[in-house]
Amino acid sequence: MSQSRLKGFRIEGKREALSSLASLISELLKEAETSPSPMKTQGTTPEGLLIEVTISRFDELRASIEDRDDGAHLLEGWAEPKRCVECNELVALLFEEEYIESVEQDGMLCLRCARELLDRGEAI
């Protein structure tokens, strides 16, 4: 595999947490091998991390994030989470320092809140 195709992520935690994660993945893989179909199973570590293991036909290893806030936490240090100034919902993970924010508000707006402000005749 060429250097430009390398993908990576980092997992960190206490020895016990990492050990329970590795054990859970191992157990789930064994369970998936013996199940007829679909080849999917899930479990939770003692620390509260929900893991779903799916045996698929894809050549690449894939990681999916189920929740926006979990994604923001996972990308902490790589991307800046931006929240709607009206409802505090996560609307963007910014990888760039330059971006557009609301002129009238102090931050970003989600589409729903922007529409509500425009419907009330307020500037965004």
Image (cartoon, rainbow, N blue to C red):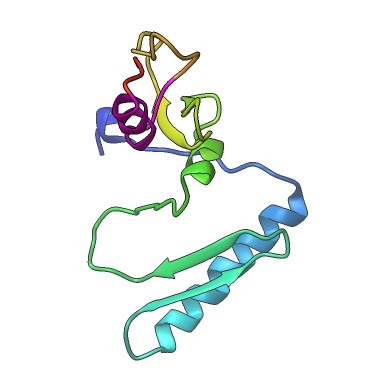
Image point 40% across, 30% down: which residue? Answer: 92
- Most foreground residue, 85 or 76: 85
**Residue 88 spot, x, y in % from top left:** 53, 33
Instruction: Answer above or below: position of 34 versus 71.
Output: below
Say whether residue 20 is magenta.
no
Image point 49% across, 80% down: which residue? Answer: 30
Instruction: Answer above or below: position of 71 versus 23.
Output: above
**Residue 40 spot, x, y in % from top left:** 39, 76
- Residue 55 position by quadrant: bottom left
**Residue 17 spot, x, y in % from top left:** 72, 55
- Most foreground residue, 81 or 4: 81
> How many numbered marks have been drawn onto this rendered protein structure?
0
Image point 52% across, 42% down: which residue? Answer: 69
- Quarter in which the N terminus is drawn: top left
- Most foreground residue, 56 or 92: 92
Instruction: Answer above or below: position of 88 versus 59.
Output: above
Magenta stretch: helix, strand or loop mostly: helix
Say whether residue 119 is magenta.
yes
**Residue 100 spot, x, y in % from top left:** 34, 12
User: What segment carries the magenta color?
Assistant: 108-120
Instruction: Answer above or below: position of 55 versus 85.
Output: below
Image point 47% across, 50% down: which residue? Answer: 67
- Residue 13 position by quadrant: top right
- Quarter in which the C terminus is drawn: top left
Name the outermost residue toward the front: 120
